[in-house]
Image (tube, rainbow, N blue to C red):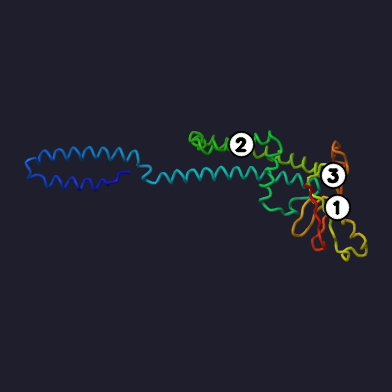
Amino acid sequence: MPFISQALWRDTLRHLTIESPLSPFGANVQIDLRRIEARLDDWFLQSRAQSGPASDGSGSNVLLDLFKKVAEASILLAALLYAMGWTYLYSYYKTFGLSLRELDLPLQDSLVFSFRVVSDSWLIATGFVLILAILASIASLERIQRALQTPWGVSAVFVLLLVAGSGLSVLGASVGTKHARSDVLETTSSLPSVSVAVDPAQFQPYPEEYLAFNTLDYKLLLRTKENVFFFAPVKTTRSTAVTRSRNFDVYVLPMSKIRSIRIQRGM
């Protein structure tokens, strides 16, 4: 951007050409000044063509466009992660006979648990990185953006997102079921042990039942503001698989009937 404006240059040159005719060199000076003015005009046009976009604030526009593209790609990525995390939680708690509707888990849990799916194996992580590369290409390459503005491009993106979302959802469900079946077993469970002290008055006319959960023989599945979910793990060897016919008990106690909870987790 020039330090002296074009209007100031023109006013200065006009002033010189008006004041100079009395000089014996006035004609030559006037001609030279007009040549200078013509050269300055060319210089201003070239300078405006080169620095015009920056002077018009397009630098900030480019930054805003970049943020817009990143935001659009982030929305798509968040939607895919949410689908993968939701199906993970759905399949995980379904193994224990629970529904997500009765658990009322917060929205961010689906996003957080989606990374358990991504980190489950290097093959899944590689596929996730490939999806990120595709989204980055869509957001950055102008040729792809122009192609996406056509009906065929929009259809291709819709099909791509549908396939990616379906694949990640199936993957999340598979990993969720695998992790749940591993946590059911006593030898492979990653859940903490728990004992629950219950108010005996809540178990009338069988007050002795309040002692049923006061040992660390149970695994804590979930604790919410209203209920505590825990179960007795299956005592089996690492090589034994949990089949559909295998039964185990899941207990749900309201917080209003609980005196205290002891949680034990290994280092």
Which residue, given by chain and number where applicable, does mark 2 sit on? Answer: 131
Type of residue at label 1? Answer: Leu
Which residue, given by chain and number where applicable, does mark 1 sit on? Answer: 216
Confirm or deny contact between disc 1 and disc 3 (CB under 8 A).
Answer: no
Could you tell me residue 211's position as x and y percent?
Answer: 90, 59
- Secondary structure of residue under mark 1: loop
Q: How crowded is mark 3: few (under 14 residues within 10 Å), some or many (20 or more)?
A: some
Confirm or deny contact between disc 2 and disc 1 (CB under 8 A).
Answer: no
Q: Name the disc covering residue 76, or none.
A: none
Type of residue at label 3? Answer: Glu
Q: In this view, does 30 lie to the left or right of 87?
A: left
Q: Is residue 116 left or right of residue 59?
A: right
Q: Is residue 188 above or below residue 211?
A: above
Which residue, given by chain and number where applicable, does mark 3 sit on? Answer: 186
Question: Which of the marked residues, 2 or 1, is nearer the chain's N terminus?
Answer: 2
Of residues 129 and 243, the one nearer the viewer is 129
- Secondary structure of residue under mark 2: helix
Type of residue at label 2? Answer: Ile
- Picture quadrant where residue 241 is located: top right
Q: Residues within 10 Å of mark 1 (few under 14, many from 20)?
A: some
Q: Residues within 10 Å of mark 2 (few under 14, many from 20)?
A: some
Q: Nearer the viewer, mark 3 or mark 2?
A: 3
